[in-house]
C-alpha cells in the first residue's frame, strides 16, 4: 500500500515540462506576500491575491496564457517567448540584467499607476527567484539529474526515473511568519545587484537539500521529501519577500531612514565573483601554493587542507575576521558592481601573521582593467588599509602576485572588502 501511495505521489510530481518548483510556486509566493507591511498590501489591493494565485506562474504559462506572456518577455529579445534564463541561471551579467529589467518594469508601472502591469511583472520576478532556489535546479547542466544519479545510484524501483519533477513538486504549505522583509536598494540597479547575491545564498541552501530529497525518494519516504523541500522553499519565500517589498518601496518611493542607512556600505567578502560562475570557487590553478590556488570565503586553508579563521596583524595585535577572502597567486577575482551606486572601495590587505610570516605578496586592486591601488607586503608587516575611488567602475578586480622566494608562505588575505556610497 505504501509503495502504491508513493507511486501516486511520483506520478503527480512529474511535470510535462522541465520547469522549476511547479505547484509550490503558489505556496512560496503567498508566504512572501503574507509578511509584507499593511501599506503594501493595501496598495496592491485585489492584485495581491492574483500574485499568489496566477501571476507567479506567468513564465511557466507563456504558451497557454498568451495575454500575460508579454510580462515574461524582454524587449531586447522580442522573438523569445520562453525565456530560459527566467528558470535557470547562466552567467552573472546575464541574469543580473534580467532581474534588473523586470524589476525596473515593475517599479515603472507602479510609478505610473499601472497596478495590474506592476503586479504581473512582480510575479515574473518572484518566479525567477523561486526557480533559481528550487532543489531541482541546483546542478548546472544536469537538469534531470542523470549525472548525479551516477554518483548516487537509484534503487531498482527508481531506475529510469527522471528526477527533476519528483525533486521539485509536492503539496505543502510554506510559512515565514515573523520574517521582516529587507530593503535591497534605493535604486533598481542597487536592488537587482543585492538581490542577485541574496539569490546566490538561496541556491546554496537549495543545493544542501537536493541529495537528502533524492535519498528520501529512494526510501519512498514522502514525509522526509517534503521536509527538505520546505527547507528550500522557506528561504525562497524570504528572498521573494525582500524583492517584492523592495519593488513596492521603489515604486511608491517610500523608504524608512534606518533602512537607507544600512545600505550605505556593503561587505563583499561573502559574495561570489564572476570566476565562481556556478556559485562555488573553482580551483584556479593546479600548481599554486598555498591553497592549491583555491580561493575561500571567510576562512583560510592551512596546508591546503584545514580551515582556520582569517587573521591579520592590525596595528600591534592580531585580529580575526569573518568577512574576507583568502586566495592563491596569479588569478584575479572579479566582482561585478552595480551602475552608479558605490563611490569608494576599502579593504585590509595582508598575510596571515603565523602561516604567512615568510611570505611576500603584491596586492592589487583594479577597476575595469586599470590599476587603482597596489602594495607589496611582507608576512611580518601589519595589514594595510587600501582605499580607492570606484565611481563608474563596473568590474572590480582583486589580484595577488608572489614577490618572494617562499611561495608556500603566501597566505594572503583580503579582509572586510567593502563598497561605500558617498
Image (tube, helix red, strand yellow):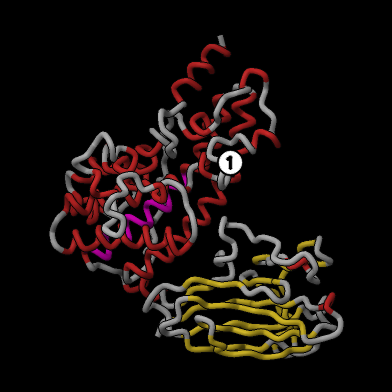
Identify the residue at image location x=43%, y=31%: 172
- The percent position of residue 387, horizontal first and vertical second, equals 55, 89
378 or 299, nearer to the observer: 378
Identify the residue at image location x=52%, y=89%: 388
Q: In this view, does 362 lie above or below 80?
A: below
Q: In which quarter of the image is residue 30?
A: top left
Identify the residue at image location x=53%, y=41%: 135
Q: Is residue 56 visible?
A: yes
Identify the residue at image location x=65%, y=71%: 325
* Horizontal arrangement in the rendering, residue 232 relative to residue 219 (left or right): left
- Furthest residue to the front? 79
421 or 295, nearer to the observer: 295
Q: Mark 1 points at which residue?
A: 209
- Furthest residue to the left? 113
Which quarter of the image is occupied by the N terminus?
A: top right
Which quarter of the image is occupied by the C terminus?
A: bottom left
- The percent position of residue 43, horizontal first and vertical second, equals 18, 54
Magenta region, mostly helix, strand or loop? helix
139 or 116, nearer to the observer: 139
* Horizontal arrangement in the rendering, residue 339 relative to residue 323 (left or right): left
Magenta segment boundaries in residue numbering: 234-251
Q: Quadrant of residue 381?
A: bottom right
* Horizontal arrangement in the rendering, residue 169 relative to residue 412 (left or right): left
Q: Is residue 397 above or below residue 377?
A: above
Q: Can residue 308 be seen in this view?
A: no
Task: Identify the element where label 1 is drawn.
Answer: helix
- The percent position of residue 376, horizontal first and vertical second, equals 71, 90
- The percent position of residue 386, horizontal first and vertical second, equals 60, 88
Q: In this view, does 373 lie above or below 319?
A: below
Question: Is 258 part of what is drawn in magenta?
Answer: no
Amino acid at each position: 500500500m505504501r509503495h502504491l501511495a508513493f507511486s501516486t505521489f511520483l506520478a503527480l510530481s512529474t511535470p510535462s515540462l522541465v520547469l522549476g518548483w511547479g505547484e509550490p510556486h503558489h505556496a512560496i509566493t503567498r508566504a512572501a506576500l503574507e509578511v509584507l507591511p499593511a501599506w503594501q498590501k493595501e496598495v496592491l489591493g485585489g492584485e495581491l491575491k492574483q500574485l499568489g494565485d496566477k501571476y507567479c506562474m506567468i513564465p511557466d504559462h507563456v504558451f497557454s496564457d498568451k495575454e500575460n506572456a508579454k510580462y515574461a518577455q524582454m524587449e531586447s529579445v522580442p522573438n523569445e517567448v520562453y525565456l530560459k534564463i527566467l528558470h535557470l541561471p547562466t552567467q552573472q551579467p546575464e541574469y543580473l540584467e534580467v532581474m534588473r529589467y523586470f524589476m525596473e518594469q515593475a517599479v515603472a508601472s507602479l510609478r505610473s499607476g499601472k497596478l495590474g502591469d506592476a503586479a504581473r511583472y512582480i510575479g515574473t520576478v518572484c518566479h525567477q527567484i523561486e526557480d533559481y532556489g528550487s532543489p531541482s535546479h541546483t546542478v548546472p547542466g544536469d537538469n534531470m539529474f542523470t549525472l548525479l544519479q551516477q554518483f548516487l545510484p537509484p534503487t531498482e524501483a527508481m531506475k529510469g526515473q527522471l528526477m527533476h519533477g519528483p525533486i521539485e513538486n509536492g503539496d505543502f504549505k510554506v510559512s515565514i511568519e515573523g520574517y521582516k522583509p529587507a530593503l535591497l536598494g534605493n535604486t533598481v540597479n542597487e536592488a537587482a545587484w543585492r538581490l542577485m547575491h541574496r539569490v546566490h545564498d538561496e541556491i546554496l541552501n537549495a543545493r544542501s537539500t537536493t541529495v537528502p530529497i533524492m535519498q528520501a525518494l529512494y526510501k519512498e519516504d514522502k514525509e522526509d521529501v517534503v521536509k527538505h523541500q520546505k527547507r528550500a522553499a522557506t528561504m525562497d519565500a524570504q528572498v521573494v519577500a525582500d524583492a517584492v517589498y523592495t519593488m513596492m518601496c521603489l515604486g511608491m518611493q517610500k523608504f524608512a531612514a534606518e533602512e537607507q542607512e544600512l545600505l550605505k556600505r556593503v561587505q563583499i567578502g561573502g559574495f561570489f565573483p564572476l570566476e565562481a560562475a556556478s556559485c562555488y570557487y573553482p580551483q584556479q590553478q593546479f600548481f599554486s601554493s598555498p591553497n592549491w590556488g583555491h580561493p575561500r570565503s571567510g576562512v583560510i586553508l592551512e596546508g591546503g587542507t584545514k580551515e582556520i579563521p582569517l587573521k591579520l596583524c592590525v596595528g600591534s595585535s592580531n585580529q580575526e575576521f569573518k568577512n574576507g577572502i583568502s586566495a592563491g597567486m596569479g588569478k584575479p577575482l572579479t566582482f561585478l558592481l552595480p551602475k552608479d551606486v558605490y563611490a569608494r572601495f576599502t579593504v585590509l590587505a595582508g598575510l596571515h601573521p603565523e602561516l604567512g610570516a615568510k611570505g611576500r605578496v603584491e596586492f592589487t586592486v583594479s577597476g575595469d582593467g586599470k590599476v587603482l591601488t597596489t602594495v607589496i607586503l611582507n608576512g611580518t608587516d601589519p595589514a594595510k588599509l587600501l582605499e580607492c575611488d570606484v565611481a563608474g567602475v563596473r568590474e572590480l578586480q582583486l589580484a595577488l602576485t608572489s614577490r618572494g622566494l617562499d611561495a608556500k608562505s603566501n597566505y594572503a588575505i583580503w579582509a572586510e572588502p567593502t563598497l561605500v556610497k558617498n
